[in-house]
Amino acid sequence: MNLDIFTDVAAWLGDGENWQGSSGVLARLGEHTLLTVASTILAVVVALPVALWLGHIGKGGAIAVNISNIGRAVPTFAVLALLAVGVLGTGTFGPFGRAGLATLVALVLFALPPLVTNSYVGVREVDRDMVEAARGMGMSGWEVFRRVELPLARPLIMTGLRLAVVQIWATATIAALVAGPGLGNIITQGFAFQDQAQVIAGAFIVAVLALLLELAMAALQRRADPLRGSRTRVRPVTVPGAEL
Amino acid sequence: MTLLVAAGDPSCLVENAWVCGEYLRTRQDLLVDATRQHLYLTVVSVVLGLVVAFPLALLARRYRTTQGAVLGTATGLYTIPSLAMFSLLLPVTGLGSDTVIIGLVLYSLTILVRNIIAGLDGVPADVKESATGMGYGPARMLLRVELPLALPTIMAGVRVATVSTVALATIGTIVGAGGLGNLLDQAIPSQFRAQILTAAVLCVVLAVVLDVILLVVQRVLTPWTRRAA
């Protein structure tokens, strides 16, 4: 391993030129942030009402849970490629840049599974006795949802949101492979120029920001969990059909 | 419009149709090679992932103070976007499949370590007490009692890890070894639709086939769960 690479990467990061301009780090960070925020809002608006309502009436569980497995099996790169080469094309889409629409749609698609599954399971996992008790106190369906199910489902809804945001951030990086916007371009451009320092510097920026985002979302999630700290059991990752 | 009409016609390549029989026929070797590389990357990564995950999980269980560190590190690694992960490994292992495999192993650890710990923790205490009463030592307890009972949870983890690995391996194309991802990457500049759709479908098929195989393996290894289900 060539240790000079660290010096080269530090030099690349220290060079103000690399941060300026339309393909500089700051412009790419702007695109990446805009994509992440926009697709998170869109995905939440689409997924939460449907998933929470299905959880409330207790229907559609198979779809709500299986959508996460489908999401895992389909490569983000393949979906981005299909969308960019297909009907959505690689045209410039407002502030989102080249292949902006294809990227945005792909990001929303991959944010849906964690949001839907976790919100649905969150509402379904609420103790049925508690729901019955609330009904017995004369609460209407809406009141049961608003005052019992929703607050108790909040930790899992936040888990879904955290997973969705981290997924969106990662997928937005891959947009560069279909000539789309975002921080991934620093990496792909580095490969195109055979500039290893740029590749590593770009990857470093992407990775550090992803970790910071995860930490911020985890902190947000802890704040939303009324029983925080009381659970120590390790939760396994599960597949439906392999009930444990 | 010419989507299916062109399927059997050589001109579908010229018309850049999504579904093209001529493409499948003429690029058969390319498709087989890419699928084979994809399968190799996936299987080697998951197997190595298990080899690394087991000692880590046992360590985390033996010394509970290390559990937070082990799980935290694994989760942190999972957060790193794949394009960045493979690029960061570049100075260490260079271009090629080694870099991709190391990256995929690191990703699989999050799921595998978590499920091995959860599976072993889920073994009922009275079962372990009975085994101790029958004179089982720690090693025999682990191999004959705890692992078999933890197997459904561990296998669930292996299935999830395998399916995600198939999807993530496509990004390996950035360091020159992406299996079916290479086909996607090559097809994008020329907007070669038949190649993109074929590679995408093959990825999903590969994930589903491996998942079904693992499910069958799990059924065979844990015959006692079938009656309950």
Image (cartoon, rainbow, N blue to C red):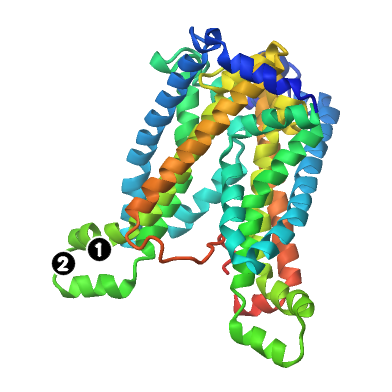
Query: Where does label 1 land, which residue?
Result: A148
Furthest-right residue in view? B29
Q: CA separation, marks 1 and 2?
A: 10 Å
Residue B158 left/right relative to A106: right
| Residue A177 visible within the image | no
User: From the image, which quarter does the C terminus of chain A lie in?
Assistant: bottom right
- Closer-to-camera residue (B222/B105): B105
**Mark 1 crowd level (few <14, some 14–19, many ≥20, 10 Å Cα):** some
**Residue at the location (56% across, 41% down)?**
B79
Looking at the image, is B135 positioned above or below residue A108? below
Contact (Cβ within 8 Å) of mark 1 with mark 2: yes
Circle number at residue A27: none
Query: Where does label 2 land, which residue?
Result: A139
Could you say whether the residue bearing mark 1 is in a helix, strand or loop? helix
Residue A146 left/right relative to A120: left
**Residue at the location (67% across, 49% down)?**
B108
Say whether mark 2 and mark 1 are on the same chain. Answer: yes
Looking at the image, is B167 positioned above or below residue A90? below
- Closer-to-camera residue (A79/B110): B110
Q: Nearer the viewer, mark 1 or mark 2?
A: 1
At label 1, the amino acid type is Val
Task: Give residue B197's position: percent from left, percent from top.
Answer: 65, 29
At label 2, the amino acid type is Met
Task: Give residue A69's position: percent from left, percent from top.
Answer: 56, 50
Q: Chain of mark 2?
A: A
Quarter assignment of residue B63: bottom right
